[in-house]
Amino acid sequence: MASRSAELFARAQRRIPGGVNSPVRAFRGLGREPFFVERAAGANIWDVDGKEYIDYVGTWGPASLGHAPAVVIDAIRAAAEHGVSFGIPNPYEVEMAELICRWVPSIQKVRMVNSGTEATMSCVRLARGFTKRDKIIKFEGCYHGHVDSLLVHAGSGALTHGQPDSAGVPAEFADLTIALPFNDIDAVRAAFRENPGEIAAVILEPVPANAGLYFPKPGFLEALRRECTMYGALLIFDEVMTGFRVARGGAQEIYRVQPDLTALGKVIGGGLPVGAFGGREEIMDQLSPLGPVYQAGTLSGNPLAMAAGLAQLRELERIDGWKKLEELGAQLESAVQDSLGRTGIGATFHRIGSMFCLFFMAGPVTDLASAKRSDQEQFARFFNRCLDAGVYFAPSQFETGFISTAHTPQQIERTARVVDASLSS
Ligand code: KE4
């Protein structure tokens, strides 16, 4: 008899393109159909056929406290009793803005939006309005959501599905985007020299996590900061994934480099649709209604989303969640490295805090080109073995895994045994 997931997927494909509302969920290239989720709690998810998994996707990053944490559920319930949406300024928005500016010193003013895509899109428009320039530098493999001008050499699902340059983006848009290899500061310097006075901003994930996970080389972020300052371009950190996850102040706290604008999302919403962008006051004040750069949103600052995000962020601070995430991440890394040493498999494990990725290639992995040398068939076999054993990793070599504070050392230990068996078979 067909599983309920299979029945639902058959129905979904008749009415939803590819049967999914976001391509990364399609399990393409894995030789299996996606499962459908019934419910999630803590570090676990259950599919509609009753199978339980330890979850390392965490709804792609937002679930830093695990799924459905009581503090978030209670906050949503309390807020909902006073109304679900207003379209009118509400106290939650002020509390969220004050918290973000307190935790991320480079952000003097911030505006709420409803997704990471909106956050990066708004950063780019604001940078163009502030500098009165049109060109943007991005890096191959970095993914900044499905913004037209940033779907050029993009990562994440665009990369997984072989569309790093999406159809439907006019050449005129793409021509204004200069895509360079990550970690190549000479290429950045050359681009600035070849486009004098034309580059509005450089946008990047300070820790790229959408082509698998890899890191800025020592000095790279500092050099970008200097080049942008020298040429009058804005430095934009897309911290939709790293914000509030790798540290309370995000990657910019760890690497001590201050961007001019920061895009945020995921963790900030406690699982509800939230994004935000912020930065220097003189830049942010170019936004309507103060300035000429228009940006808006019916549901921006939605009270339920703000209440959920505030509850999650405050709980992370109360329990020093970042310390716990580091401990759990280190436990997983130690076990995986032991397995790699014992099996002799040419694979590269990268981790920062609770974010991790296992590349099926010997390394080093420092940019998209090296990440793409991974053996995707070996990844697919590994992913399927782990899933069959009840461990759900991100369903693509070009994604990143996430641990939550709800994961226990015992679950990490069980995961390590599943990983070891999957690598050994
Ligand atoms: P959303 O529009 O999906 O909320 O955020 C876009 C985005 C922006 N910047 C970074 C660094 C991101 O990682 C993302 C979205 N991440 C993907 C996972 N790699 C979301 C999963 C999906 O597309 O379904």
Image (spheres, rainbow, N blue to C red):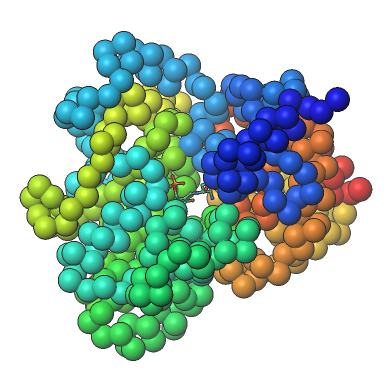
> Which part of the image, by quadrant, shows the N terminus?
top right
128 vs 171, left or right, is left
Label count reads: 0
Front-lying residue, 364 or 297: 297
Snapshot quadrant of residue 74: top left
Front-lying residue, 36 or 192: 36
Can residue 106 be spotted in the picture?
A: no
The correct choice, above or below, for 230 with respect to 75 in the image is below
Residue at image location 26% in from the left, 13% down from the top? 82
Farthest residue to the right: give it: 425
Farthest residue to the bottom: give it: 194
The correct choice, above or below, for 212 with respect to 37 in the image is below
Snapshot quadrant of residue 297: top left
The correct choice, above or below, for 195 with respect to 52 in the image is below
Residue 396 on image: x %, y %: 67, 52
Residue at image location 18% in from the left, 69% down from the top? 131
351 vs 413, left or right, is left
Farthest residue to the left: give it: 290
Residue 363 on image: x %, y %: 70, 67
Front-lying residue, 55 or 65: 55
Residue at image location 74% in from the left, 41% down from the top? 33
140 vs 399, left or right, is left
Can residue 371 be spotted in the picture?
A: yes
The correct choice, above or below, for 210 with respect to 139 in the image is above
Residue 299 on image: x %, y %: 29, 34
Residue 181 on image: x %, y %: 51, 75
116 vs 197, left or right, is right
